[in-house]
Amino acid sequence: MKRKVSLKDIAQQVGVSTALVSYVLNGQEKEKRVGEEIASKIREAARALNYQPNQIAKSLKSGKTHTIGLIVADIANPFSAHIARIIEDEAKRHKYNVVFGSSDENAEKAWDLMKVLLNRQIDGFIIAPAEHAEEQVRYLQEHHIPFVLIDRYFPGLPANYVALDNYKAAYEGVEHLIQKGYKHIGMINFKSGLHHLQERTRAYHQALQDFNLPAAESWCREVNEDMLKEDMDQHLQDLLLSGQPVEALFLASNKIAIHGLKFINEHKLRVPEDVAVIGFDETDAYELFYRPVTHIRQPMAEIGRAAVQALLQLIAGNPEPTQLNLAATLVVKESC
Amino acid sequence: MKRKVSLKDIAQQVGVSTALVSYVLNGQEKEKRVGEEIASKIREAARALNYQPNQIAKSLKSGKTHTIGLIVADIANPFSAHIARIIEDEAKRHKYNVVFGSSDENAEKAWDLMKVLLNRQIDGFIIAPAEHAEEQVRYLQEHHIPFVLIDRYFPGLPANYVALDNYKAAYEGVEHLIQKGYKHIGMINFKSGLHHLQERTRAYHQALQDFNLPAAESWCREVNEDMLKEDMDQHLQDLLLSGQPVEALFLASNKIAIHGLKFINEHKLRVPEDVAVIGFDETDAYELFYRPVTHIRQPMAEIGRAAVQALLQLIAGNPEPTQLNLAATLVVKESC
DNA sequence: CTGAAAGCGCTTACAG
DNA sequence: CTGAAAGCGCTTACAG
């Protein structure tokens, strides 16, 4: 890469100090009362030489990089990708760039990522924290590094976050099933200590109880992320193809839903006749399933924008706490 | 953010110059013959103070940021997101970070993005270039900025790229339809001057010709990205629900396929009895459709990895040309 | 109105 | 074996 033109080149060409060039190019010619004539000469030279300021040098001086670090579970997951896009756009509106990393729900990986990005002096983080990532959160807090959690947070650990009201969202979903007349309602969720997922399960139990519906322990299943297919197959076998199958199924994430719907297809079960289905999050699969799937949609745009805005406030030194549990939308289709 | 500990802090604590600290921490104590005792004192102090080198300062000195700029059409598109993930992982293996931007297939936006990222001194680009982005490519070449194109390239403009053999991939897809006995085969592609898309259409025409099949002009349709739904609906109406419907449909991208399958669902057409379908790229929708969809799968992992490796070669000053047209895989399911 | 100089946190030839 | 010093490309208080 050719050496780029620097302030000094311009200064030399015009015959002034780099200070003046800096002032003019940063629009401070008024405050610093730079001569009109010189100012225009400088601007002209800058244009002629196609001057592009070196942001690295600026960053070293200012301590600001105008870069946000985004840590998600997996950028390839449509949920993460969608939110990444919104964050990108909102960041760009404020002249920020985004560097990302995927943690694979692994606190270790997330920690490494965080360290790497910190060394690159990003101005702040937007993080979808993995399970057991409390230590990271505390680290960031102790070091006064601006960050906003998205999607998840740790109830015992006050921090800025923008998330969903998972309890309410899930409750409404189950309530919908109940109102449609289903009595034997099963649920599949991830086996995870993450609060946002547990809230979904809690809502499921509470809704059944509130409406005096039967609630067998065995109707609420948990699957491991890292052996999703096997676990799903086994639990679906139990729930849908054994003794007394459930009438309806609450699938608590997009990935879970995709596997569930696949299973239903493979076994030629009819939806909603054999089993009604409600999903969580978004995936093209919901619309493409032969019976478009009712699902609980998160307000992605709001989450992303609010997170960026909150973060930029923090970066600007404005420590207003942001703790948002946004409302989901129940998108009713034909699957229940 | 608290001021971080710098080389100077360590130097002061140990009572040496920053030079020594730098040598030791960069593993040059042998070459520079730093005293064993001092070296270990320095390492200890670094650990005690939890020293983290400021990469910005390093970058300013070295001119390298260890950051790759990734420009895709839309990070929210599963294709882009998937490739982003692979690029992220491969980059991380080489201690590189990735900053991304979405161009929305808009050459202007892509140009702006490129300029912004260049000022942030990224070491090189991986770009899925938009239509009319030739100027950008030339700019990068003239300025000797390392870059590798992915997914698309400009045939008249030699550059490094890692892409698909779109002609072959599409040809095999259409051939598959032909071998299944379908005679009236329609196609829907984007209206675009992009070579990789045109190659798909060219292959379609050529395959029909090679097998002496009828080829009505009106069977090959083009849709605009920015009014995808409307265009798709209209063309599908013509192709599937009018006078003489086509028997099979080649849908030349994941987004096109999703809309196509939706339409088919809505109009209760049977696949493959009423219309056979073959798609391109990947989407959860293919497996979730009530008849899992035969599709042409790109070798995402290879594309991503090859692109990163080629780019790192360039960054390292190794100007070996990389121009790969990788082979796709025909994934045969039940839709044709 | 303008310039010389220090400094951001590193690296690295050079001198001793 | 070690240190003083210059320099990467900026910004900015300070002096005149």
Image (cartoon, coloured by chain):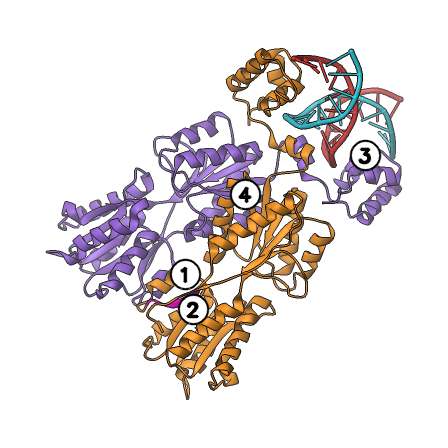
Chain colours: A purple, B orange, C cyan, D red
Q: Position of residue B297 (x, y in %)?
A: 44, 62
Residue A17 left/right relative to A173: right
Badge 1 density bin: few <14, some 14–19, many ≥20, Cα 10 Å = many
Q: Residues within 10 Å of mark 3 (few under 14, many from 20)?
A: some
Residue wearing tag 1: B283
Q: Do we see residue B231 in this rendering?
A: no
Would you identify the image quadrant in which residue B245 lies? bottom left
At 47% from the left and 56% from the top, the residue drawn is B300
B322 to B280, vertically: above or below: above
Question: Residue at the location (64% across, 64% down)?
Answer: B154
Q: CA distance from mark 3 to mark 1?
A: 54 Å
Q: Amino acid at mark 4?
A: Val
Indicate the secondary structure of the residue bearing disc 3: helix
Helix, strand or loop status at disc 2 = strand
Q: Quadrant of the N terminus of chain A?
A: top right
Circle nearer the viewer, 2 or 3: 2
**Residue B266 percent across, percent down from the top left:** 35, 73
Gap in angstroms between the C-alphas marked 2 and 3: 58 Å
The one nearer the camera, A301 or A276, is A276
Left or right of residue B276, residue B319 in this image: right
Q: Which residue is mark 2?
A: B279
- The three-letter code of the residue at mark 3 reads Thr
Q: Which mark is residue A18?
A: 3
Q: Residue at x 69, y 52 (%)?
A: B140
Q: Which residues are magenta?
A: B292-296
Residue A330 picture location, percent across and down? 33, 56
Q: Amino acid at mark 2?
A: Gly
Say which of B25 and A7 sits in front.
B25
> Which residue lies under the disc numbered 4?
A99
Q: Are marks 2 and 4 on the same chain?
A: no
